[in-house]
Image (cartoon, helix red, strand yellow):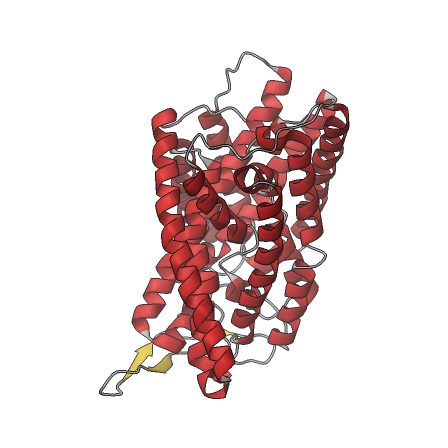
Amino acid sequence: MSSYDPENGATNGAVSVNNDNSNHQQQTVVIPETAHQISTDSWLQAGFVLTTGINSAYVLGYSGAIMVPLGWIPAVLGLLAATVISLYANALIAKLHEYGGKRHIRYRDLAGFIYGPRAYSLTWALQYINLFMINTGFIILAGSSIKAAYELFNENHALKLPYCIIISGFVCALFAIGIPHLSALRIWLGVSTFFGLIYIVIAIALSLKDGINSPPRDYTVPTERGKVFTTIGAAANLVFAFNTGMLPEIQATVRKPVVGNMMKALYFQFSVGVVPMYAIVFIGYWAYGNKTDSYLLSNVHGPVWVKALANISTFLQTVIALHIFASPMYEYLDTRFGITGSAFHPKNLGSRVLIRGGYLALNTFVSALLPFLGDFMSLTGAISTFPLTFILANHMYFKAKRNKLSMAMKIWLWINIVFFSCMAVASFIAALRLIAVDSKTYHVFADLEG
């Protein structure tokens, strides 16, 4: 089977992989043909895809999920360090995109080519757990924004958070049915940027106003849920903020030269793209201290119509951003079930309604069941972002380039592997404990306040 590259007519077929076992046997990883479009986008479009992810509605939660548990100095230093380390780790993955003389359009394809079939399956599992949990968080955010907008005009609390989450999941499904693949977003990336700027500018402006007019804030790190566990969880949130877990899939959409163009997209993401995120995270925490909520728009004060506009923009941007992070699953499902061609062909439309609708229905159910956004960010960072973006990236680069690396570079790569492995284990334990604590405090399908 093969995936077609329209730029040069090349195909990606079955791959033979050398495993380092005693018999030096060759095993074959069969790379399935993709039903989606590749090799057509500019580096700037890829940069906007990455920037849309980093400045998604999740930024409204970082003041509460990162700054509050860590405090000023650790959080600022942590964010700066996470920026540099994340750029470095993503660059390693980007540089391996054409390793072995062929394009690896999926994360699992690259892992399978380097390690073999077992790594292919394991990477597949890690990646889709990662993306499923990210999308779960998006639906929680979308539901929270609907609830916040509703309560600006109605104080009866009749519209509960689980109902809002169901509405959000339904709208996300409608959007998913109409947009066949990642490259087809195009104009929607501009729309997403527009909505993102609305809620970021409003949140910054109202936070500045509140901060200027408020008495001194308390920036003491809270200890109610255990300082050690919340600190470790916040560290996982740091890496979650900057990484997609789907860089090869985004790079697959980029025109040649794919490595050079992807590096331009990454530099765009980690320079221009991080500025709005930094601004809203730091200003939000400055304005409200350790009372900063996990959804910043719940803290701000201002005209009702302005807050409503911010919440509605948050909801609409989240629908688009979720589609980006769900696209690898959509690609897998479309390829698996042979869904190609026009998005509105009756057969394809019906298939997408059933397949993508079913996937998002499961996402929506989990979102409504356990709507603890900060804990899900920590858990996602622990079980998938650390392994995919840091542990696997460093080890794949070591394995692929080890004959060309200096001893100092090899040691550096292994330091990263060991350190982030320890962080992944610690963050996993911390996230599970925080979810357990919140599950005792709040019942399932809880109507959490924003």
**From what the image shows, is residue 194 above or below residue 445?**
below
**From what the image shows, is residue 113 above or below residue 429?**
below
Residue 286: x percent and y percent?
A: 68, 35
Which of the 4 quarters of the picture holds residue 342? Answer: bottom right
**Residue 217 located left or right of residue 252:** right
Along the line of sight, which residue is nearer the eye, 11 or 304?
304
> Who's the residue at 75% across and 32% down the image?
208
Residue 176 seen in render: yes
Which of the 4 quarters of the picture holds residue 436? Answer: top left
Which of the 4 quarters of the picture holds residue 142? Answer: top right
Residue 354: x percent and y percent?
A: 40, 45
Along the line of sight, which residue is nearer the eye, 436 or 49?
436
Residue 78: x percent and y percent?
A: 57, 52
**Residue 371 located left or right of residue 91:** left
Residue found farthest to the top? 156
Q: Quadrant of the N terminus?
A: bottom left
> Who's the residue at 51% across and 78% down the image?
409
> Who's the residue at 46% across and 78% down the image?
410
